[in-house]
Amino acid sequence: MNSVFKFMALAICSAALGLSASAVWAQTHQHAHPQGQSKASTPRTVLPFDEKTWAHALQHGPRPAAYSYCSTCPAAFAVLHKAVQQRKDKPELNAVMMDVAVPKALRNASHFKGMTQMYAFDGFEPAIRQAVDPTWPNVTPYVVLIDARGQKQRVIGQPNATVLKRWLTAS
């Protein structure tokens, strides 16, 4: 009877160890979708975002670039991604998660296809709205498009074709 318990304990421990090793391997290796297409990569890090981050992005950030402010608005982000998908010089597409701590932001990353960088802001939301645009009403998604010259376009909701064209053709 004692050997049966030892055998069962060994079998259970071996299975648990095997499952743990499989889980670790799956987290560190990208898998292909059943259709054979590789999954789009998503950022593994989330950078903090505050009033100073926005000022720095305006002065030193890449051009053109887009910043989408909303943690639950992937549809607006999808419009941005579709607009730049065929371009050789893809603009940065950044998502700023509002009122979301880093772990929750990472869980949302897969919903923002084509994202270059994810930021998380977890603080006094009116301070960010004031820094980004003092006239920004408390409405999301709020998208700021910065063209190659550094000119800004602000959009509530999904950017339309005219706005996207102006953003991407400015030189």
Image (tube, helix red, strand yellow):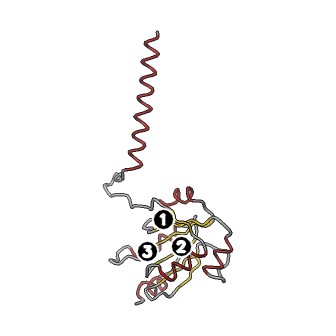
To which residue does mark 3 refer? 92
**Residue at 39% in and 50% down:** 28
Which element type, helix, strand or loop, lies under badge 1? loop
Q: Amino acid at mark 1?
A: Phe
Which is more N-terminal, label 2 or label 1? 2
- Distance of label 1 from label 2 (alpha carbons): 10 Å
- Distance of label 2 from label 3 (alpha carbons): 11 Å
Q: Is residue 120 left or right of residue 35?
A: right
To which residue does mark 1 refer? 112
**Residue at 45% in and 59% down:** 44
Q: Nearer the viewer, mark 1 or mark 3?
A: 3
Which element type, helix, strand or loop, lies under badge 3? strand
Q: Amino acid at mark 2?
A: Ser
Q: Position of residue 91 (x, y in %)?
A: 41, 77
Which is more N-terminal, label 3 or label 2? 2
Quarter of the rendering occupied by the C terminus = bottom left
Front-lying residue, 111 or 20? 20
Front-lying residue, 59 or 44? 59
Image-quadrant location for residue 63? bottom left
Q: Amino acid at mark 3?
A: Glu
Mark 2 neighbour density, 10 Å: few (under 14) some (14–19) many (20 or more): many
**Residue at 64% in and 76% down:** 129
- Distance of label 1 from label 3 (alpha carbons): 13 Å
Which element type, helix, strand or loop, lies under badge 2? strand
Q: Residue furthest top?
A: 1
Which is more N-terminal, label 3 or label 1? 3
Image-quadrant location for residue 114? bottom left
To which residue does mark 2 refer? 68
**Residue at 63% in and 79% down:** 131
Instruction: Kindly check if marks 1 and 2 are in contact, taking CB atoms under 8 A apart as contact.
Output: yes
- Numbered badge on residue 134: none
